[in-house]
Amino acid sequence: MTNIDRIEKLAAEQNLPDEDLYALLTSLTEKEEELLYARARAVRERHYDKAVYLRGLIEFSNYCRNDCYYCGIRAAASGVSRYRLSADEILACCNQGYALGFRTFVLQSGEDLTYSCTDICHLVSAIKEAHPDCAVTLSIGEKTREEYEAYFDAGADRYLLREETADPVHYVKLHPPALSGENRKRCLYDLKEIGYQVGAGFMVGSPGQTAENIIADLRFLQSLTPHMIGIGPFIHAGGTPFAHEPDGTLTDTLHLLGILRLLFPRCLLPATTALGTIDPRGREKGILAGANVVMPNLSPRGVRDKYLLYDGKICTGDEAAECRNCMEMRIASTGYQVVVSRGDYCQG
Ligand code: SAH
């Protein structure tokens, strides 16, 4: 079978055996990648037409108890100026975001235990009260099932927690012994069962990652069937054990976006900030490879340059309104269109 056949088969059947996925992941010519992206765009347009959904990202604390080897805000990173936003500051970001047309707020942070379960619940319910037509997404790491249930009962709609890598051996290369891939997967299954719209995913080109590891992620995602899949290139971060590791590539990330769109036709697939960081038009290229979500930053300008998961992160000096307008223009340049909508998963 040729790669052309493999792409057509993937588009028709939403699946492929491992050896064919392996071929697509390791050897696509330019002509083949054009076909992959064309099929991916056709599938996303069948379910989502030309719409690109906005998520307003509020990075509300960069304190973290964990020491993930890749992450620029890991506990052991020195030289990080730590901050946390108050509930009032977070609400002010939401109000500003609402005026700019955001209908989803993503609250992301390191694993900062200063915010108790009750604090998070109060925050979620305050946002839902102020903006009942908006979705609230949490991305605050690994918690107990009871905590996830409490946030959900308080009104949280969605939860983002990348598995990072589904392969247990690779997981150990990326994380300290205190963390376990098994617990992360447990969290994802709990979140799904509780009723969240769940986002999983992984970095592309993280140190030690092989094509076999990526296939393990694709199989894990098929078993979880999340609503959203977040992938972006690994980018080195100063002050971490991986400070001198090579970055993931634009090409590998775009290939994976195309493959993910064909494997998961209805999934919400963001063109991430990391993709925009490794290439000035990375997010536009991501949209043209099958992505349908972008996550502009709504964090207050004063803290933007402190939430540095990796070096060179873009948009750290802009106001939320500038980011919003810039994004609208960038997306319009692809022929797709930013819409004012919660952008829920399309059930069909
Ligand atoms: N504490 C939360 C949020 C983590 S930050 C949690 O544990 O889920 C969000 C994502 O950024 C991570 O899941 C990881 O995949 C990504 N990330 C972290 N460091 C990165 C790096 N150096 N390059 C690219 N992406 C990175």
Image (cartoon, rainbow, N blue to C red):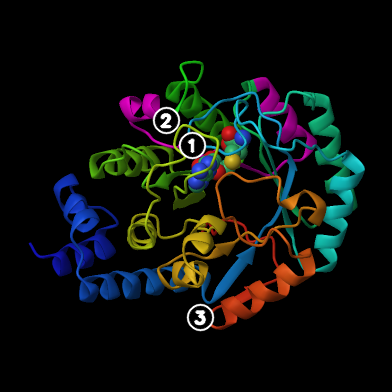
The residue drawn where x is 47% and y is 21% is 176
Count of marks, rendered view:
3
Left or right: 147, with 220 as reference point? right
The residue at label 1 has a CB less than 8 Å from ligand 1: yes
Between marks 1 and 3, how big is the CA–CA gap? Answer: 32 Å
Instruction: Give the farthest residue toward the left.
Output: 1
Where does ligand 1 appear, by image quarter? top right
Tell me, for residue 70, which label it has, or none: 1
Report the residue marked by disc 2: 174
> What residue span does the magenta drawing correspond to?
146-173
Is residue 171 visible in this depiction of the protein?
yes
Q: Kindly identify the amino acid type of the residue bearing the numbered disc 1.
A: Tyr
- Mark 2–mark 1 distance (CA, rounded to whole Å): 7 Å
Disc 3: CA contacts within 10 A as few (<14), some (14-19) or many (>=20):
some
Is residue 132 something one can see in this rendering?
A: no
- The amino acid type of the residue labelled 2 equals Leu
User: Would you say residue 318 sits in the magenta stretch?
Assistant: no
CB-based contact (under 8 Å), mark 2 and mark 1 = yes
Q: What residue type is disc 3 on?
A: Thr
Say left or right for 332 vs 175: right
Q: Is residue 308 left or right of residue 58?
A: left
Residue at mark 3: 334
Q: For residue 195, what is the image quadrant?
A: top right
